[in-house]
Every structure is written in C-alpha cells, then in structure tokens.
C-alpha cells in the first residue's frame, strides 16, 4: 500500500516533533542527517525502530510532547529486561478511543449494547482501551476485568450483557462454563470482541458455536496506542485498519524491503498523528499481508490478513523464507489430512531438505496425496519438500502447543 502525499506530510510533522524533542528516534534521524521527508522514496529511507530501542529509552525517553501535556502512561509487559513506557497526551487518549469506537461500529455494535470487559486494567493497554472505546460509542460498560468466572457469569446474566470482550482463551473458558452449567438460555450475548492473539479456526468455531455469537478480532499493540487500531467486519475478510491514524507497510523480515500487496511479511507501523510517543517504521515482528482489493462491506479502510505468526518462527530454506503458518495454510486445503504435522529440516550433501510429515487414514492413497501436497508447496512457496504421509495418530500430541518444526541443521 503506497504511502499517500497526505500521509507523508503527516509523517513529516511527526519527524519535526521527534527531532525537536531529541528522543531516541530524533537522535537516529539526526545521525542519518534526515531533517524531513517529502516523497515516498524519502519515507523508504527512514530508519526502522525496534522494541529494543524503546526499552533503552526507559523510563521516559520516548516522551515527545512537553511534560505538561502528558496525561497518562502505559507499559508493555517486558518478559525480558526493561519494560517499555509509552506516554500519552489527552489527544492520544482521545484518538485511541475514537479508533476503538470505530472498531465496535465495524463489528455492528451500537450505543444500545452492553459491553462486558474481561481483559485486565492497569499499566497495560487492554481493559481501559476497551472501556474508553465503548464509552465513546455511548454503549454501557460492565468493567469486570479478568478472572472470577462465577461473578462474570452472574453479571452476564443479570446485566444482560450483549457483547463480551476477552482473550480467546478466556472466551473459550467462559463458553465451556456456560455450557457446563446449562446457562445458555439465560445469556443475551450476541457478539464477542477478541484480543489479537493468534488463534486457530477450530477454537474460533468452538467459541462461536457454544456461545452462539459472532466473533471479531481486534488488532493492536501497546507501543502503537493499544488494541483498537483495526478489526474485521462481518464479512470476515481480514482486519480493516485505520489508515488515518497509522500507516502500515509489509516488509521482508530479512531484507527489510517492502513486499508487494498480497505477499506475506512483517507488519511495520508508522504513527501519523501521535503526540506523546510517535513511532516511525516500528517493526512489530507480527507476520501478515495486505489484502488487495475492496471488501464487500464497502469500507474505505484497507485490510490486513489475520496475524499468521511471528517473524521469529521464520525458517530459511534453499534461500526461501518459509513460515510454518504457510505450510499450515496449505495443509488446511487438504481435508483428508489431520491438523497435526511436523516439519524437519536437514542439510544433506550440501543441500537443505525439508521433510513434511502429515497424517491421514487408510482410505487415502498415501503416494498420490504426498505428491499433491509436495506440488502445492512447490507452487505456493517455491521449493519441493519430501512429504511423508503417516497413519492417523502417529504424530505426537500434547496438551500445550506441540513443537512442529525441527531444524536439524544446527543440532
Ligand atoms: Zn469489510
């Protein structure tokens, strides 16, 4: 998606504030001798930013607006090392609520809905984001926060909640409890707005079926406002994102060159109007693609595909970047194989080989199936794997996420 002239002028303003504030990115620009941009080529020459840059700016090195304009901070949970602190101005807080309200509207939620919010409140951006957006929309908020399933279900019935906001795992837990306790007739839920972890189609179907609701995936990250920068519409053809607040490019995670619309790569986000902590070309390490063309809902907002995984999952084989999710997508097109698979990569006589193990039952010709899968991988990804078809139940299963990729080249 080519950056527009208007977006360039917006980025240029962000650059001026960053330089003036002398924040980490302002210094990067100064080192690179960049004082402003006026063309798409100028934009493409801007340095990227990374989570590590933000960590190094701890605690307040990201602050780009004057102190008296900052009204709030949020923080992303640092699993390793220092957390990241994001300062917000009053306008940032309001912009975020506007974007979030737009998410609810895109999901067909209105000011007559009652929205039960189960994500956490506090330093991170979840609960309060869901709440501000709902208030901006004019809906009624039931601000539960996480946990206490008994109370959640009681309030859900008594308050006649029509919308549930949750992580996919908590939504599933609630769905199972409702089923187990026989409460299904007593709940009024119509829609679920689910935070953007990566979740499988099967889990989605189970939550939707058990609760009898429509599900919407909301996208966002703390570094860029929080959840609410995009959501799917009822046609479920990808996530509409708000390109009047953010510019998204998809880049090859190795070369960092933008890829054409439709191709898989890393999501890189630039804020267009943020004041407290603007970010330029921020690498999310989330994998997705821009979906070309128009959505049947006629929204003017462009679309991202669902998040397909993280760049850290990438495997390089015979010079081609491969993501396990791409293999998964291909296998989904073969109804005769199970959802289990294993990828093994080895280096033999100077060449990389990929063996792909899949399961099926005895009613299928293993040889023909293996050839069909290999051909599809070749046409989609560009190399031919050795496909080994095995009996159903032979691949290992575990309660947690199974390890599916074994790179024996480095063992
Ligand atoms: Zn749409």
Image (cartoon, rainbow, N blue to C red):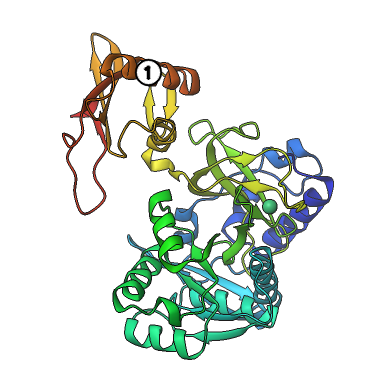
Residue 266 picture location, percent across and down = 52, 41
Q: Nearer the viewer, residue 397 or 81?
A: 397
What residue sits right under mark 1 in the picture? Answer: 374
Q: Can you tell which quarter of the image residue 10 is in?
A: bottom right
Q: Image height check: is 243 above or below 328?
A: below
Q: Is residue 289 something that shows in the picture?
A: yes
Q: Image height check: is 64 above or below 28?
A: below
* Left or right of 369 in this view: 280: right
**Dividing the image into 4 quarters, which one contains the C terminus?**
top left
Residue visible at 54% across and 66% down?
61
Residue visible at 65% across and 76% down?
93
Q: Image height check: is 151 above or below 330?
A: below
Q: Nearer the viewer, residue 238 or 259?
A: 238
Q: Can you tell which quarter of the image residue 219 is in?
A: bottom right
Residue 194 picture location, percent across and down = 49, 64
Callout 1 secondary element? helix
**Dividing the image into 4 quarters, which one contains the N terminus?**
top right
Residue visible at 36% across and 75% down?
178
């Amino acid at each position: 998606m080519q950056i527009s002239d208007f977006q360039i002028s917006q980025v240029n303003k962000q650059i001026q504030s960053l330089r003036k504030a002398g924040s980490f990115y302002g210094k990067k620009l100064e080192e690179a001798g960049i004082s402003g941009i006026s063309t798409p080529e100028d934009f493409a020459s801007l340095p990227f930013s990374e989570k590590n840059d933000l960590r190094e700016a701890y605690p307040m090195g990201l602050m780009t607006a004057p102190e008296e304009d900052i009204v709030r901070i949020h923080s992303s949970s640092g699993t390793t090392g220092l957390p990241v602190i994001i300062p917000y101005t009053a306008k940032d807080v309001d912009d975020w609520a506007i974007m979030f309200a737009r998410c609810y509207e895109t999901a067909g939620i209105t000011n007559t809905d009652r929205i039960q919010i189960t994500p956490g409140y506090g330093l991170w951006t979840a609960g309060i984001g869901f709440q501000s957006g709902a208030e901006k929309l004019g809906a009624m908020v039931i601000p539960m926060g996480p946990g206490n399933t008994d109370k959640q279900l009681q309030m859900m019935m008594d308050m006649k909640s029509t919308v549930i906001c949750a992580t996919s795992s908590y939504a599933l837990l609630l769905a199972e409890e409702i089923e187990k306790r026989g409460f299904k007739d007593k709940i009024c839920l119509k829609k679920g707005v689910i935070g953007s972890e990566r979740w499988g189609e099967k889990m989605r179907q189970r939550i939707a079926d058990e609760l009898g609701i429509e599900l919407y995936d909301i996208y966002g990250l703390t570094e860029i406002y929080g959840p609410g920068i995009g959501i799917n519409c009822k046609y479920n053809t990808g996530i509409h994102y708000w390109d009047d607040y953010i510019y998204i490019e998809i880049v090859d995670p190795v070369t960092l060159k933008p890829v054409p619309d439709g191709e898989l790569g890393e999501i890189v986000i630039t804020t267009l109007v943020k004041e407290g902590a603007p970010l330029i070309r921020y690498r999310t390490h989330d994998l997705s693609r821009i979906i070309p063309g128009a959505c049947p809902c006629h929204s003017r907002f462009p679309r991202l595909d669902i998040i397909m995984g993280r760049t850290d999952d990438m495997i390089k084989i015979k010079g081609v970047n491969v993501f396990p999710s791409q293999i998964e997508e291909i296998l989904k097109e073969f109804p005769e194989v199970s959802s289990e698979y294993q990828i093994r990569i080895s280096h033999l006589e100077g060449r990389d080989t990929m063996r792909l193990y899949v399961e099926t039952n005895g009613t299928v010709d293993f040889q023909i199936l293996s050839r069909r899968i290999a051909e599809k991988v070749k046409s989609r990804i560009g190399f031919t794997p050795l496909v080994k078809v095995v009996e159903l139940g032979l691949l290992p299963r575990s309660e947690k996420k199974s390890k599916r990729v074994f790179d024996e080249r480095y063992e």
